[in-house]
Image (spheres, rainbow, N blue to C red):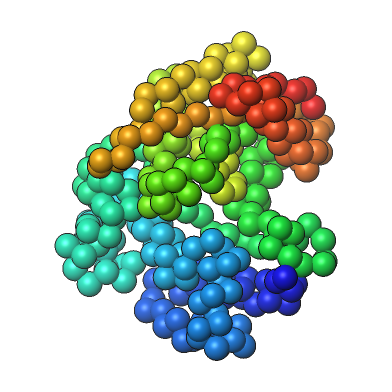
């Protein structure tokens, strides 16, 4: 069992990492603030986050660098240096290993999603235990978007059997699926000239919020998102099929933000229970 106090220490480690992503980070310094030995810290961090501390740092830096590639005019070398890569070449190799394409091609593709956002640990209750830990991502962003819109639809897009993908093909392939799924979602949105973010909120879930559109339009978009996933995912010598289940909920300015999130989550679960690879719409 992992106690609540240990989780708080790991959250302190995450906070430290986030504050120093643009600087050199020594793992020993992170371990010190958790009051753990280096070896214990490595083990506990991996158990809680499902990834090593070095991988967490690497993915966060590369994800932020991807934002700069698409949203800024910085040179690729300057971006590399900003995220602690000493040379263009070392940055390009690391970026291509994670994203599957070079930084230059990623910039030209112009389809950014924050696939590896900051993780915030919360609890379903105070008893602890690994199953009681929520690894939240971008919850504040979603709530702010809901609060700023008079009426709209929220889509919760969940990758079906994602853990099985990790187990069968490895986490490197799982990461590439996490990168390509929102790119395909973004392609559908761009086809309709919708300037809408695709926001990762959990291990295998992405949220899209669309305002000023009809129910029929939202259902059409959802069907196209499901259909675009039917093309096989190909990563080097690995070819696999991926499907998604989509929960949809309508909301207005009078709705409670938390209840909107709960409603769309319920819709997504109903889509999965109905057989997956489909959408389910609930009116909050």
Please indicate whether residue 55 sits to the left or right of residue 72 in the image.
right
Vertically, is 248 above or below 181? above
Residue 69 appears at what percent x and percent y?
A: 31, 50
**Is residue 68 found left or right of 222 in the rendered image?**
left
The reply to whether residue 208 is visible in this rendering is: no
Q: Position of residue 57 (x, y in %)?
A: 43, 67
Residue 185 vertical position relative to residue 90 in the rendered view, above or below: above
Location of the C terminus by quadrant is top right
Quarter of the image for residue 131 reads bottom right
- Image coordinates of residue 46 in percent, x first then y, are 53, 68
Q: Is residue 49 visible?
A: yes
Which residue is pictured at 44% across the width and 36% down the height? Answer: 181
State whether residue 113 is above or below residue 226: below
Q: Residue at x 46, y 86 (%)?
A: 28
x, y (%) of residue 87? 19, 68
Identify the image quadrant of the N terminus: bottom right
Q: Nearer the viewer, residue 95 or 65?
A: 95
Q: Is residue 161 left or right of residue 111?
A: right
Residue for point 46% across, 64% down: 56
Q: Name which residue lies at 25% across and 42% down.
A: 236
């Amino acid at each position: 069992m992992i106690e609540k106090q240990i989780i708080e220490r790991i959250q302190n480690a995450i906070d430290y990492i986030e504050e120093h992503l643009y600087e050199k980070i020594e793992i020993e310094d992170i371990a010190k603030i958790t009051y753990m030995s280096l070896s214990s810290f490595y083990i506990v961090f991996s158990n809680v986050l499902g990834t090593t501390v070095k991988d967490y740092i690497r993915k966060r830096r590369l994800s932020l660098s991807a934002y700069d590639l698409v949203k800024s005019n910085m040179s690729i070398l300057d971006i590399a240096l900003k995220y602690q890569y000493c040379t263009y070449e070392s940055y390009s190799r690391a970026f291509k290993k994670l994203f599957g394409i070079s930084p230059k091609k990623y910039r030209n593709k112009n389809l950014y999603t924050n696939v590896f956002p900051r993780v915030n640990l919360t609890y379903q209750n105070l008893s602890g235990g690994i199953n009681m830990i929520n690894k939240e991502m971008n919850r504040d962003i979603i709530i702010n978007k809901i609060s700023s819109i008079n009426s709209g639809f929220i889509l919760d897009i969940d990758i079906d059997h994602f853990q099985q993908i990790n187990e069968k093909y490895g986490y490197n392939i799982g990461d590439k699926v996490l990168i390509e799924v929102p790119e395909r979602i973004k392609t559908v949105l761009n086809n309709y000239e919708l300037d809408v973010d695709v926001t990762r909120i959990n291990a295998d879930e992405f949220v899209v919020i669309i305002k000023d559109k009809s129910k029929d339009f939202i259902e059409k978009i959802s069907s196209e998102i499901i259909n675009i996933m039917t093309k096989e995912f190909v990563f080097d010598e690995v070819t696999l099929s991926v499907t998604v289940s989509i929960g949809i909920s309508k909301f207005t300015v009078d709705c409670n933000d938390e209840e909107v999130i709960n409603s769309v989550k319920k819709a997504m679960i109903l889509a999965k229970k109905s057989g997956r690879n489909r959408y389910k719409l609930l009116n909050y």
